[in-house]
Image (cartoon, coloured by chain):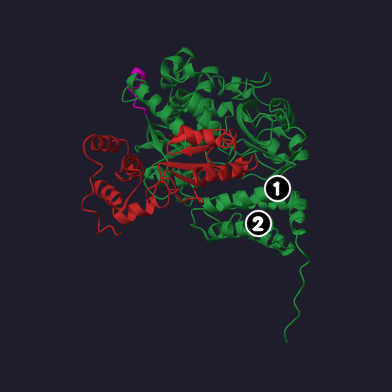
Chain colours: A red, B green
C-alpha cells in the first residue's frame, strides 16, 4: 500500500497521553528528528508493528517526509514492517551461542510451535520464530526474546515448558 | 563477580562488587553503598581537575579501542560557547560481550553517576545513554534510575543543589550492531539511519547535532566515580609491575565451551591461563580448549598456546597475536570445527553491514558465501586464496572497521587453524580438470 492510499480508518497514535509523552520527549533534543526512533517505538508498542499509516503519522508530527521515515524504519531490524504473531520469538544463533547448541534450540522451537520454517507464522497465528544476531547474553545460552520479554538459558529440553508458560 | 557464580578470591571487585544484590539496584540501596558521594565531590571540582585526575589514573576506553579517557576528555573545551554532549555507548552488541548489560541491570545508578561526572568534566549539560533495543531489562532499570535521580534532585537544573545543570537521558536503539560504532551512534541518535561518518571531523569537534561530543563506553564511565572517590594512585595500582600503560580493573564476559561462563573482574595484567582454568573452571569434561577469541568476535583468534601465554592487558593481548577489545572472551573447544564458527561470524557481519562501502557490502557477503560453501563440503583450495584476497581488500579501506572485523577471523583462522579448513576440503572428491574443448 502506498502512503498516499493510507487507510482512512487509521486512528492516530499521538493523541492524549502519547501526545504529551512525545512533547516531553522533544524537550530532550535540539532537533525534532532526534525523536524519530522513540516515536517509532511508541507506534510499535501501541499497534504491534509500524504500518504505512504509522510512518505517515510520525512523519507529520516530526516534520519529516514519509519516505525519510521509511528509510529509517527499514534500517533497524527491531521495527516490524508487517504484523507479527502473538508470540514473536527471536533466538540468538551467533557464534558464542552457536558453539553451545543454539541451532538445536531453533529446531526444537520450530517443532513445538508448529512453524514450518523460520519467519513463517504457525497456522494458528500464535507463534513466529526467527534467528537474530547476538542478543548480548552470551554467557546464558541460549537467550531468546518473546516479544519484549528476555529469556535466558533456554535448552532443547526446556522448550516445551517455555512455550506452555507463554499462554 | 563471576555472576551468576560466587566471586572468586582472585578477582578484584570494583565495578562488579554489587552484581547479584537486588538491594543495590534502587536509589536508597545505592546511596547506602556510597552512591553519589563521588558526584557530589566532582560537582565541586573544576572540569580540568577531573580531567587531570582521570588522566593520572591511566583509565582507558573499555569499549574496545583503549584510548586514554582523560586525554579524550581534554579535547573538549568547556566555555567555548557551544553546547557539549556526552554520549554513553550502551549499545553492547559485540558477540561475546555482556558486561555492560550486567552493570546496567545490577548497578544502574553507578552508570548514571558516571555519566553525570563525565558530563560535568567535558562541560556538557546533557548526557545520552544509547542502549540497544534488545536490552529490555537494562532499559527498564536505567529509566527507573534516571527517574529516581531526577526526583531526588541529583539530576536536573540544580543537580545536587549545586546550581549546575546535568541531564541524563536514556535513548533506546532499534536493532543495529553498527550503531555501536561511535559516529553511527551519533547519526542514530539524531534520528537517522545508523551509517558511520567519515572522520575527520572527530566527535570532539563536530559530533552529535554538529556539536562537540565525547562518546564513552558504559564500563569506562562506571569506573569514574571510583577514581573520584579513591584517587588516581589507587586505580593505578591495579596493574602488572612491568607495564604501566594498562591500569585498573577490567570486566571480562566469558562464554562458549567452558565450565563457568559469566562476568569476571580482574586487575590489568592478570595471567590469562589462571583466568581460564582457575576462575572459569577450564574446559568442559573430556574436552580441551582449541581457540580463544578474547575481545569479542572482531579480534584475531588465539591458539590455546597463545592464550595461555597472555597477560591480560592492552599490551599483553597484542603481544600474543590479538587485542583486548571489549573483553568478551569466546572459548571454542576441540569438538568444534572452527570454520563453521568463522562462517557464522562472517554471516553476522554481512547481516550487520550498513552497506555504505563497497568493500564491506560485497566483501562480507562473498566471504560468507565462500565460507558456507566450504562448511557444506563444496570448497576448494582456491577458496583459501580468494578469501585472503577479499580479506585484504576489506582491511583499512572503509569508513569504519566493521569490514576489517569480518576479515580478521578469516585471516587468523586460515593462518592459525588451516587444518580445520583442510579437513573440510578433503571430504570432497578429487576435482578433475575438464578436457579443453577445441
Q: Nearer the viewer, residue A117 or B279?
A: A117
Q: Is residue A43 left or right of residue A89?
A: left
Q: Label 2: which residue?
A: B371
Q: Secondary structure at mark 2?
A: helix
Q: Which residues are magenta?
A: B159-167
Number of residues whose C-alpha sits closer than 10 Å to that of mark 2, classed few (under 14), some (14–19) or many (20 or more): many
Q: Secondary structure at mark 1?
A: helix
Q: Nearer the viewer, residue B65 or A35?
A: A35
Q: Is residue A119 left or right of residue B414?
A: left
Give the mark, 2 or 1, whose residue is nearer the N terminus.
1
Q: Are marks 2 and 1 in contact (CB under 8 Å)?
A: no
Q: Nearer the viewer, residue B26 or A1?
A: A1
Residue B165 point in image, percent of width and height: 34, 27
Please identify the residue farthest to the bottom as the structure is shown.
Answer: B438
> Please, which chain is the residue tagged with disc 2 on?
B
**Dividing the picture into quarters, in which one does residue A70 lie?**
bottom left
Q: Label 1: which residue?
A: B338
Quarter placement of the N terminus of chain B: top right
Residue A31 point in image, percent of width and height: 30, 43
> Please, which chain is the residue tagged with disc 1 on?
B
Q: Is residue B99 left or right of residue B300?
A: left
The reply to whether the magenta stretch includes residue B164 is yes
Residue B252 point in image, percent of width and height: 62, 31
Amino acid at each position: 500500500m502506498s502512503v498516499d492510499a493510507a487507510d482512512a480508518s487509521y486512528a492516530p497514535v499521538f493523541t492524549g497521553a502519547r501526545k504529551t509523552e512525545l512533547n516531553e520527549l522533544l524537550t530532550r533534543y535540539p532537533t525534532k528528528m532526534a525523536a524519530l526512533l522513540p516515536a517509532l517505538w511508541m507506534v510499535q508498542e501501541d499497534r504491534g508493528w509500524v504500518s504505512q499509516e504509522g510512518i505517515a503519522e510520525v512523519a507529520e508530527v516530526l516534520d519529516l517526509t514519509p519516505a525519510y521515515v521509511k528509510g529509517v524504519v527499514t534500517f533497524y531490524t527491531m521495527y516490524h514492517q508487517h504484523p507479527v504473531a502473538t508470540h514473536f520469538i527471536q533466538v540468538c544463533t551467533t557464534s558464542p551461542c552457536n558453539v553451545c547448541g543454539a541451532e538445536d534450540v531453533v529446531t526444537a522451537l520450530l517443532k513445538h510451535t508448529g512453524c514450518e520454517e523460520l519467519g513463517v507464522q504457525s497456522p494458528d497465528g500464535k507463534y513466529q520464530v526467527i534467528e537474530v544476531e547476538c542478543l548480548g547474553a552470551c554467557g546464558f545460552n541460549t537467550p531468546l526474546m518473546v516479544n519484549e520479554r528476555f529469556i535466558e538459558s533456554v535448552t532443547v529440553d526446556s522448550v516445551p515448558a517455555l512455550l506452555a508458560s507463554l499462554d | 563477580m563471576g555472576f551468576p557464580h560466587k566471586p572468586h578470591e582472585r578477582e578484584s571487585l570494583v565495578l562488579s562488587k554489587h552484581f547479584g544484590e537486588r538491594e543495590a539496584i534502587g536509589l536508597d540501596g545505592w546511596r547506602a553503598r556510597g552512591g553519589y558521594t563521588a558526584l557530589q565531590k566532582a560537582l565541586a571540582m573544576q572540569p580540568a581537575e577531573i580531567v587531570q585526575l582521570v588522566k593520572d589514573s591511566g583509565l582507558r576506553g573499555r569499549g574496545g579501542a583503549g584510548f586514554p579517557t582523560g586525554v579524550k576528555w581534554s579535547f573538549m573545551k568547556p566555555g567555548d560557547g557551544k553546547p557539549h554532549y556526552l554520549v554513553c555507548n550502551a549499545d553492547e552488541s559485540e558477540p561475546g560481550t555482556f558486561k555492560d548489560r550486567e552493570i546496567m541491570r545490577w548497578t544502574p545508578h553507578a552508570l548514571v553517576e558516571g555519566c553525570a561526572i563525565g558530563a560535568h568534566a567535558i562541560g556538557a549539560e546533557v548526557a545520552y545513554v544509547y542502549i540497544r533495543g534488545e536490552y529490555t531489562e537494562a532499559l527498564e532499570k536505567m529509566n527507573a534510575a534516571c527517574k529516581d535521580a531526577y526526583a531526588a534532585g541529583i539530576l536536573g537544573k540544580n543537580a545536587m543543589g549545586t546550581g549546575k545543570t546535568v541531564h541524563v537521558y536514556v535513548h533506546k536503539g532499534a536493532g543495529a550492531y553498527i550503531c555501536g560504532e561511535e559516529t553511527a551512534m551519533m547519526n542514530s541518535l539524531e534520528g537517522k539511519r545508523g551509517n558511520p561518518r567519515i572522520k575527520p571531523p572527530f566527535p570532539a569537534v563536530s559530533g552529535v547535532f554538529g556539536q562537540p561530543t565525547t562518546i564513552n563506553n558504559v564500563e569506562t564511565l562506571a569506573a569514574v566515580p571510583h577514581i573520584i572517590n579513591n584517587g588516581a594512585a589507587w586505580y593505578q595500582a591495579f596493574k602488572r609491575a612491568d607495564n604501566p600503560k594498562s591500569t585498573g580493573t577490567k570486566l571480562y564476559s566469558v562464554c562458549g565451551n567452558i565450565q563457568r561462563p559469566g562476568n569476571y573482574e580482574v586487575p590489568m595484567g592478570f595471567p590469562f591461563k589462571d583466568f581460564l582454568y582457575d576462575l572459569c573452571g577450564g574446559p568442559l569434561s573430556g574436552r580441551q580448549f582449541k581457540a580463544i577469541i578474547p575481545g569479542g568476535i572482531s579480534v584475531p583468534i588465539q591458539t590455546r598456546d597463545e592464550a595461555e601465554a597472555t597477560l591480560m592487558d592492552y599490551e599483553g593481548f597484542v603481544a600474543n597475536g590479538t587485542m583486548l577489545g571489549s573483553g568478551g572472551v569466546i572459548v571454542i573447544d576441540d569438538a568444534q570445527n572452527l570454520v563453521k564458527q568463522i562462517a557464522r561470524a562472517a554471516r553476522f557481519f554481512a547481516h550487520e553491514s550498513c552497506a555504505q562501502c563497497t568493500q564491506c557490502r560485497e566483501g562480507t557477503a562473498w566471504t560468507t558465501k565462500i565460507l558456507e560453501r566450504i562448511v557444506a563440503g563444496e570448497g576448494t583450495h582456491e577458496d583459501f586464496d580468494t578469501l585472503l584476497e577479499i580479506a585484504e581488500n576489506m582491511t583499512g579501506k572503509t569508513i569504519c572497521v566493521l569490514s576489517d572485523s569480518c576479515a580478521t577471523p578469516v585471516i587468523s583462522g586460515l593462518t592459525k587453524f588451516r587444518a580445520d579448513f583442510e579437513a573440510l576440503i578433503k571430504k570432497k572428491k578429487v576435482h578433475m580438470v575438464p578436457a579443453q574443448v577445441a
